[in-house]
Amino acid sequence: MTPAARTRLKRVRASAGIVKLALQQIEDELAGDIDAQELAEILRELHREADPQEGLFGALAQLLTVAARTAERIEPDHDGDASCPLHEAAALVTEDAGLQAYYATRALDPQGERAP
């Protein structure tokens, strides 16, 4: 591994650690004493139906898409063995996980989608 690659990996590990801490904070908030409307608002931060790229799921899907594009560029046979699963993972995050979070949000706070 080159020095540049080692440095990049260290930065990624540090960033992933920060993300894990942030997710733990959200998990702690979810475990607290919250009502349905507040839970719905927290879920809207994970997935925003009006603009899915703005939510946490959208950010994760974007990261997976960038990884897929990188895999496309470096795959030995350009056969999609690495890139296709990454593209699929990105789609699953926004389409499946995001949609399920949206359904839960609507069930918890049906009026919230129309709030200003």
Image (cartoon, rainbow, N blue to C red):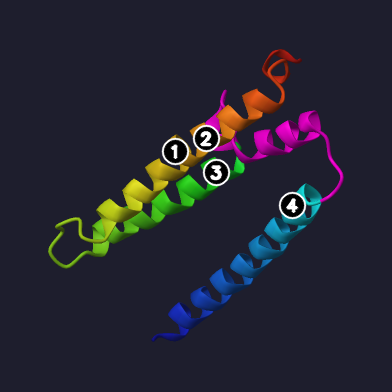
Query: Residue beneath label 3, please?
Result: 57
- Judged from the image, the secondary structure of the residue bearing numbered disc 3 is helix
Q: Amino acid at mark 3?
A: Phe
The residue at the point 72 percent across, 60 percent down is 24
**Marks 1 and 4, the one that precedes in the sequence:** 4
Closer to us: 63 or 46:
46
Closer to us: 98 or 62:
98
- Judged from the image, the secondary structure of the residue bearing numbered disc 2 is helix
Q: For the residue carrying disc 1, how many other residues have a C-alpha within 10 Å: few (<14), some (14-19), or many (20+)?
A: few
Numbered tag placed on residue 100 in the rendering: 2
Query: Residue beneath label 1, please?
Result: 96
Q: Amino acid at mark 1?
A: Asp
Hey, which residue is sitting farthest right in the picture?
Answer: 33
User: Does the residue at mark 1 contact the one at mark 2 (Cβ under 8 Å)?
Assistant: yes
Q: Amino acid at mark 2?
A: Gln
Query: Residue beneath label 4, please?
Result: 26
Residue 102 pos. (x, y %): 57, 30
**Marks 3 and 4, the one that precedes in the sequence:** 4
Q: How many marks?
A: 4
The Cα–Cα distance between marks 1 and 4, rounded to whole angstroms, is 21 Å
Q: Nearer the viewer, mark 1 or mark 3?
A: 1
Q: Is residue 76 above or below residue 80?
A: below
Magenta span: 32-54
